[in-house]
Image (tube, helix red, strand yellow):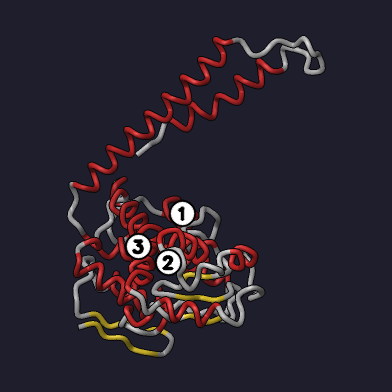
Amino acid sequence: MKRSGALLLAALPVIATGLYFVMPTDSADAPAAPPAADATARSAREDAGDRAERERAEDDALVAGLPPGLAAPEKKELAQRLVASAENSALDWRSLYGGIEDLGDGQGYTAGTVGLRTGTHDLLTLVERYSEEHPGNGLERYPPAPREVDGTDPHEGLDPGFTAAWRAEAGLPAFREAQEEERGRVYFEPSVRLAKLDGLNTLGQFVCYDAMVFHGPGTGREGFHGLRERAMRKARTPARGGSQEAYPDAFLDVRRAAMLARRPDGDTSRVDTAQRRFLRAGNLKLETPLVREMYGETFRVP
């Protein structure tokens, strides 16, 4: 679906620049921009905002009218199990609330059910949101420390108590619920929504969700949105007339390359011997039983 609002906004700086250079900038008597120009710019911004809201409402209505796909309760449970097997070599994702360790990947501590990290923004956001809703919790004193290491690897300000506090808090239902909400808000819901707008079926939606978890929702070359943009240059999405096989295959190609760009000796089996295998087997509805091989292990989902 094309978005025209951005084009209108992009033209505004050009208009403003033309008005600016008509008057000398070093004159104290230079008049302010004409009220008509301000009104025009304000009206354009409001129109663009209204257009974006209408388009989002149209997208929401479209998604609401589609089959649940990966959002169906049994498929969502399956998705969490598959991600857990890839992230933590375990199918029981509920056993991972209290998991926390440094994987030596330069991202600090990795914790929780989808691998939130102290070296990125997601773990910090969870701790801050949780502390706002549950003041006095065992992690409340740590947000300043994760903020200092946000985007870096060091543990300064976190050791020695952060890991113990995380594990202790993970025993509480409220913290488990907070982890699930963060997983849904940041990873599951945005990726599945976008996959549905791209016309993807259940397997394609899972391909997007797993990529969002692993790469994060960034727009750079290794972020999910960057990967999607590059994949769309290689193959059309089903929503644009492409096939349910060709586009996910192109997406997995792009994703695999990004994984190897990050770590040339890294393991890409979650793509090669799992998702790619499901795709080539024609399991587009992600039906069980499933068998996937990763990291030298075989995982069976009955």
| Residue marked by disc 1 | 225
Image check: 289 left or right of 103? left
Q: Hey, which residue is sitting farthest front in the picture?
A: 136
Which quarter of the figure has residue 252? bottom left
Residue 250 can be seen, yes or no: no
Q: Which mark's residue is nearer the viewer, 2 or 3?
A: 3
As shown in the figure, which amino acid type bears the numbered disc 3?
Answer: Glu
Q: Quick one: label 1, few (<14), some, or many (20+) residues within 10 Å?
A: many
Label whose residue precedes the other's in the sequence (3 or 1): 3
Q: Quick one: label 2, few (<14), some, or many (20+) residues within 10 Å?
A: many
In three-dimensional space, the C-alpha distance between marks 3 and 1, rounded to whole angstroms, equals 21 Å
Q: Residue at x 50, y 71 (%)?
A: 139
Q: Residue at x 64, y 64 (%)?
A: 148
Q: How many numbered discs?
A: 3
Residue 84 rendering spot, x and y as whole percentages: 36, 77
In three-dimensional space, the C-alpha distance between marks 2 and 1, rounded to whole angstroms, equals 12 Å
Residue 229 rendering spot, x and y as whole percentages: 46, 51
As shown in the figure, which amino acid type bears the numbered disc 1?
Answer: His
Image check: 268 left or right of 152? left
| Element class at badge 2 | helix
Label whose residue precedes the other's in the sequence (2 or 3): 3
